[in-house]
Image (cartoon, grey):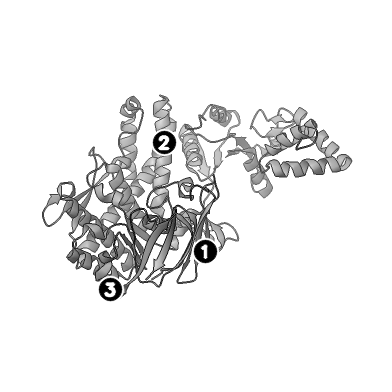
Amino acid sequence: MPHLSTLTLSHFRSWRRAQLPFDGRIVAIHGANGAGKTNLIEAISLLSPGRGLRRGSAEEFARRPEALGWKIAAELDSGQELETSAEPGASRAVRIGGKAAPQVALASELRMLWLVPSMDRLFIEGAEGRRRFLDRAAMSFEPAHAEATLAYDKAMRERNRLLKDMVRDAHWYEALEGQMAAAGARIQAGRARTISALMAAQNAAETAFPAATLSLIHPEAGPQGSDEGLRRLFAEGRRRDMAAGRTLDGPHRADLAAIWAEKAMPAADCSTGEQKALLISLILANARALAADGPAPLLLLDEVAAHLDAARRAALYDEIHALGAQAFLTGTGPELFDELGERALRLQITEEEGESHAHRH
Amino acid sequence: MADGPEEIGRLIGLMARLPGMGPRSARRAVLHLVKKRSQVLLPLAEAMKAVGESVRPCVACGNLATSDLCPICANPKRATGTLCVVADVADLWAMERSQAFQGRYHVLGGLLSALDAIGPDELGIPKLVARVTEEELTEIILALPATIDGQTTAHYIADALPELNVTSLAQGVPIGGELDFLDDGTISAALRARARV
């Protein structure tokens, strides 16, 4: 199981400079609000492709007020070195084993899943967040899912521009819709496989967390799945889309429905605590499904412990430990991690004069 | 004055706008030119003047030419009935370097992109369609980039010429390339396009 053995931060958010050694055990991070705990796990999240767990920009990551460039480096237990950094005003660059590499290449070095407080409202808020959640899970199984999403979005932006400009060139629409349909069919198939994998992993596990019945729903019922069906959907929707100035229907409108299986209750109607338990259940299922045919992923769980009672907390720790995953957990007080005992490395984060420090104990 | 006399500053400013150049490399290049006045600066100025006065796009294909027709379009041996469509002159040069293609070309001068306001007319696609009958073409080979815009352009041209044999370059393992260095997309494309040994 690959794990981080060292993490080095330089001028990243509240961290001026830090070098943190890990030993593969769970890392329990505690400290006051604003000490820099989330910044630390956000830095780890940037060792995967994308914008990290807070969806930040390269400029926001720079430590203020200096606003110099920032750098995050990590060594894995295999000896592999990952590094990501940005100069002021430039986008972030990635180096793997000392060589410049594209961001997507990070996905084949480390697999990573995270749960952050902004996801607490996932089941209540708009479909976009749930779609992103599902697509992230799909990417964790199949990194190529990211390319299909990018291709679909790009072709759709082009089509939307034609619609807005009232262009009536059928060949042009067909060319773009053909690409949207091909990428869209791959996206939908990847989402369907992801949902089955998550459900299977939930059902197979002995867990203290509730199982969710997941399904992919769509505002307008239509021939959604196939390349051919999508092509027809876009062609037939052209007139209506032109009136709206954008693409009204397609895989970009799909939604993930979750039902608390045991109570047959939609996730959105469950209590806040129950929704959190469902989310944890999905993340654990995702991790188990990944661990079943490869190394366990890294888990970044921000402020997860606070919402759980002592029994559920103990169960979560047991389940993470059984997975063999290197997990980074944050919480305000050390007592939240008592149930972990010797299974965790403990870090206290403090902040002095706008600078974060880590203390091991 | 940071960059010497005003004329030199102007030259540096112009050079710095060239692809692959910045202010620092432009200053170095200009200093070099001034130092090698007779060997480099004056011949370069003459060469640039000659190109500026004589080079224009070929009226038939869009390649660079010094007369109405470029040497490829003027050569009757290259009227093979096969036409290769490329996005830019640089792509045409790359095809020519390979010496693998004997027909003529059509340079689009870009790719379809609604977001960049580049449509079929800007790319001269109607002219391409007209060439099919004028030149009795039997096959069009699309040598366009494997990007969204490249593929959109390819689909567009294929749609606009339903009667014609429109083909596109294969995608896959480069000659002398090792699988270990290929990205997943290229490997899947190569697998789909596998051929009997």
> Is A268 situated left or right of B68 in this image?
left
For this orientation, the residue located farthest to the front is A353
Residue A149 is situated, as x and y percent measured from the top left of the image, at 39, 46
Q: Position of residue A11 (x, y in %)?
A: 50, 54
Q: Which residue is mark 1?
A: B180
Q: Residues within 10 Å of mark 1 (few under 14, many from 20)?
A: few
The CA span between labels 1 and 2 is 34 Å
Between residue A225 and residue B101, name the one nearer to us: A225
- Is residue A170 shown to the viewer in this render? no
Q: Amino acid at mark 2?
A: Arg
Question: Which residue is labeled 3 in the image?
Answer: A341
- How far apart marks 2 and 3 lie (CA) works out to 52 Å
The answer to which quarter of the image holds residue A239 is: top left
Regarding mark 2 in the picture, which secondary structure is present there?
helix
Residue flagged by tag 3: what amino acid is it? Gly
Q: Residue at x 31, y 33 (%)?
A: A248
At x 65% / y 41%, what residue is drawn? B90
Q: Amino acid at mark 1?
A: Asp
Query: Is residue A154 rendered to the left or right of residue A290?
Result: right
Pointer 2 indicates a residue of which chain?
A
Q: Position of residue A198 (x, y in %)?
A: 26, 59
Say what secondary structure mark 3 lies in: helix
Mark 1 or 2, closer to the camera: 2
From this viewpoint, is residue B94 visible?
Answer: yes
Crowd around label 3: few <14 · some 14–19 · many ≥20 (10 Å): few
Tags 1 and 2 in contact by the CB under 8 Å rule? Answer: no
Q: What residue is pinned by disc 2? A: A157
Q: Which is more N-terminal, label 3 or label 2? A: 2
